[in-house]
Image (cartoon, rainbow, N blue to C red):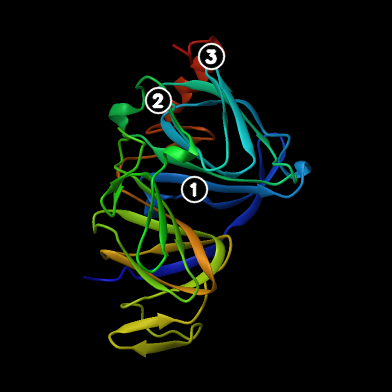
Amino acid sequence: MSIRAVKRVVPSTPTMEGAGVRLRRAFGFGDTSEFDPFLMMDDFRGDTPADYSAGFPWHPHRGIETITYVLAGEVEHGDSLGNRGVLGPGSVQWMTAGRGILHQEMPRGDALGRMHGFQLWANLPSSLKMTAPRYQDIVGRDIPEVTDDDGTKVRVICGDFWGVKGPVEGVAAEPRYLDVSVPPGKRKTLKVETYRQVFAYIFEGSGRFLNASEPFGALREEIIAGEEIVVRDEVGNRSLVVFGSGDEVTVQAGEQGVRFLLVSGKPIREPVAWHGPIVMNTQAEIKQAMADLRSGAFIR
């Protein structure tokens, strides 16, 4: 067994998207090779409607999958294929854009005006970039939650974990999407196969990640505990943890406990050509997508 080294900890970056939604970007755009097959992740939350009510009006997607996970408030969505719906607290939508779709997502706060959710983009391999669009809408009660003896809770949104299979199926990059809660002061080890790329995003509480291979450095105070090195720096709210190779991730929860997304997948390792919400393999394919938008051939 080998603990995955913590390559770095990155605070999410304040940004604005859609028609004026204030959010925090964990990663995205530019070189995302170390997150492959994932392309971008946003944390959108606010305590007042002014932070998010402008929403994400009609816009196109091609060549990717978008994963929207709602914790508080609601997201009303619609698309060019006639689909309509509302994502409530605890629910997830896994949308395969494939060859093309136009859609909109409009956040609404709860009774106190609060809204919180995440959107993750997953790449599609070249063989599936022009597949037919589809949705998988999963309500919160259908997402299994498992609790370990020490009180650790894991919601299994996608993939297999602790003998439980998440409800999202048929996704190309074999993703595992977990919502993990570790009680105060508890230490938890979570298995992640060596072939996967993996990251964690902390959104409640704080914790320390164990690191068996990271050398001593001037910027961190570390102690040796057995054969492990415990990194004293606590990773807190809205922080992205980027891991290296290994087959497990171990976290020591802080005084308030820690809750984080643990996301992993099988790398696609193909060229990536970006044009906002359209992600293909070549610039020629991007030009074709833009031509399709202009000519009305984007939706087939």
Q: Residues within 10 Å of mark 2 (few under 14, many from 20)?
A: many
Q: Residue at x 38, y 64 (%)?
A: 243
Vertical comparison of 203 with 127: above or below: below
Q: Nearer the viewer, residue 35 or 106?
A: 106
Give the amino acid at mark 1: Gly
Q: Is residue 251 above or below residue 191?
A: below
- Number of labelled discs? 3
Q: Please state which of residues 86 and 79 is positioned toward the viewer in this rendering.
A: 86
Residue placed under numbered mark 3 in the picture: 82
Which image quadrant: the N terminus? bottom left
- Name the residue that disc number 1 marks: 30
- Residue 217 in percent (x, y) is at 44, 84
User: What residue is shown with label 2?
Assistant: 98
- Is residue 89 visible in the rendered image? The answer is yes
**Is residue 296 shown above or below 108?**
above
Describe residue 174's horizontal placement relative to residue 71 as left or right: left
Q: Secondary structure at mark 2?
A: loop
- Image coordinates of residue 69 in percent, x first then y, are 51, 42
Q: Residue at x 40, y 82 (%)?
A: 230
